[in-house]
Structures are given as C-alpha cells and as structure tokens.
Image (tube, grey):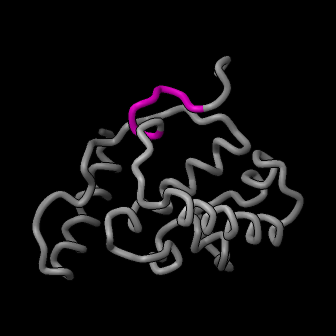
Amino acid sequence: MIPSIQLIAGRTAQGYNQRKKRKGAFWEDRYHATAIESGKHLMRCMIYIDLNMVRAGIVKHPSEWIMNSYSEIQNPPDRYSLIDTKGLMELCGLINKEQLRSEYRQWVEDSINDSGSSREPCWTESIAVGVASL
C-alpha cells in the first residue's frame, strides 16, 4: 500500500473508532487496484464504493456519508472538488451535470433495492472489470 493511502486509511479509521467508541479494523482488506472500463462499469464501481458504508451498517444511505462521490455529485462544492465532473460525464456518455445527478441518484437507489448490501467480488478480486478485451 502506498504510504499516503496507508496514512489516510489509518487516520480515518482511528478517528471513526474514537468517535464511535469502537475497536477493530475499519477496512477489511488492504488496498487493491482494479482496472475499470469507462461507461457503465465505471459507474457500477463508483456506486459499489459509495455503498461500502451502507454494507458496513454505518449509514442507511450514501447521502448520510459526506465523504463519497454520491454526496459530491448530488451537492457539488463551489471549490476544491475531488471529482472531475466534466471528465466523468465524458467517460460515462452523459450530457450535463443535471443528467449526471439524476441518473447517478437513480442508479444508487436501484442498487440499494437490488443488492446494495451484497459484496461483489469482481471489485475486490479482479484485475480488470469491463469487456473481455480489457
């Protein structure tokens, strides 16, 4: 794991555990890189990550966790955005920010209703996710 990711992961876990008076691992496994194809595969990956805290039982909906792509897409900051919205829209074939907000919100709701609490090994065990040629 690269040192910056390790530092962020450690500090986040430590702070959360102190606030919630809990102990133990915050993230189950180590950092794992997976190549993701653009379009629907990229969106599915983002949604899967946004639902991590739902699966962990920390929140009921990703809107309750402010440090995720769901919150930034639904309520874009005026400054210091972490997401390249224009690039994301281009990669996913979306026309404008309102379409991104609307469709992302719907995709998250559909995922929660379908299998939001289920772990999907393709994101944590695969080298690449997308078409076979990827």
Q: Is 126 on the left or on the right of 57, as rendered?
A: right
Work out which residue is located at the far front of the displayed protein and give it. Answer: 114
Task: Please state the extent of the stretch shown in magenta in the rendering.
Answer: 123-129
* x and y, in percent, of residue 25 in the image: 17, 57
Q: Nearer the viewer, residue 122 or 73?
A: 122
Percent of width and height locating residue 45:
56, 48
Tell me if residue 34 comes above or below residue 113 in the rendering: above
Instruction: Choose top left, top right, bottom left or bottom right for residue 91.
Output: top right
The residue drawn where x is 50% and y is 56% is 115
Q: Is residue 128 magenta?
A: yes
Q: Residue at x 32, y 70 (%)?
A: 57
Quadrant placement of the N terminus: top left
Indicate left or right for 68 with 10 as reference.
right
x then y, percent, for residue 105: 67, 70
| 134 sits left or right of 86 in the view | left
Q: Quadrant of residue 12?
A: bottom left
Can you say which quadrant of the picture contains the C terminus? top right
Q: Is residue 76 left or right of residue 61?
A: right
Look at the picture and state if 123 lies above or below 74: above
Residue at 22% x, 73% y is 15
Res 10 quadrant in image = bottom left
Q: Is residue 134 magenta?
A: no
Please tell me which residue is depicted at 42% across the width and 60% down the height of the picture.
117
**In the picture shown, does residue 115 fall above or below 15?**
above
Residue furthest out toward the right: 95
x%, y% of residue 90? 81, 49
